[in-house]
Image (cartoon, rainbow, N blue to C red):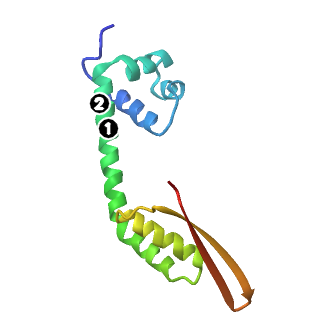
Amino acid sequence: MCGLKQLQNYHYEAMKLRITGQTYKKIADQVNKKAQTVNNWFNNDKLFQEEYEDLKEELRAKNKDKLLDLTAEAIEALSRNLNCNNPHAEINAAKEILNRVGIEEKTKVEEETTLTNASEIDVTFSRSSDK
């Protein structure tokens, strides 16, 4: 089988549609090609595959940059949860922070919360080794 020598705009449109989760059949309908042709592009054509991988890598890099831009807000949200007067949320936030800074959870922590009256909450923790 002879591979593509040059990609056209509809090839790039097919790539974008596939990234959004479209099937080969739906892509074929959108770019006015047969589903088997679209299938061949994605599975057999080296030039198309290389461009498709480049496009996916470019999108991954952009999304990583977006996530990095949200880091400060995410840290602030965790910080708020550390002091929210909800023991379960506070523990989860603390565990998440510790996990993110590389302090792995070595033991399983089980939490039991008991409501003794409307103004007091008793929290009991028990630890058991996961290993």
Vertical position of residue 11 compared to residue 131: above or below? above
| Residue type indicated by callout 2 | Glu
Q: Going by the image, does 121 lie left or right of 47?
A: right
Q: Quadrant of residue 73?
A: bottom left
Q: Quadrant of residue 103?
A: bottom left
Vertical position of residue 123 compared to residue 129: above or below? below
Q: Helix or strand or loop: what does disc 1 sit on?
A: helix
The reply to whether discs 2 and 1 touch (Cβ–Cβ < 8 Å) is yes
**Which quarter of the rendering shows the N terminus?**
top left
Of 122 and 39, nearer the camera is 122
Circle 2 residue: 51
Q: Whole-percent x and y of residue 13? A: 39, 33
Q: What separation in Å lies between label 2 and label 1 (alpha carbons)?
A: 6 Å
| Residue type indicated by callout 1 | Leu
Check the image and name the residue furthest to the left: 5
Q: Give me the residue at 62% from left, 71% from top.
A: 111
Of 71 and 125, nearer the camera is 125
Q: Whole-percent x and y of residue 38? A: 44, 21
Q: Going by the image, does 110 lie left or right of 62?
A: right
Check the image and name the residue furthest to the top: 1
Q: Helix or strand or loop: what does disc 2 sit on?
A: helix
Q: What label does residue 55 carry, if any?
A: 1
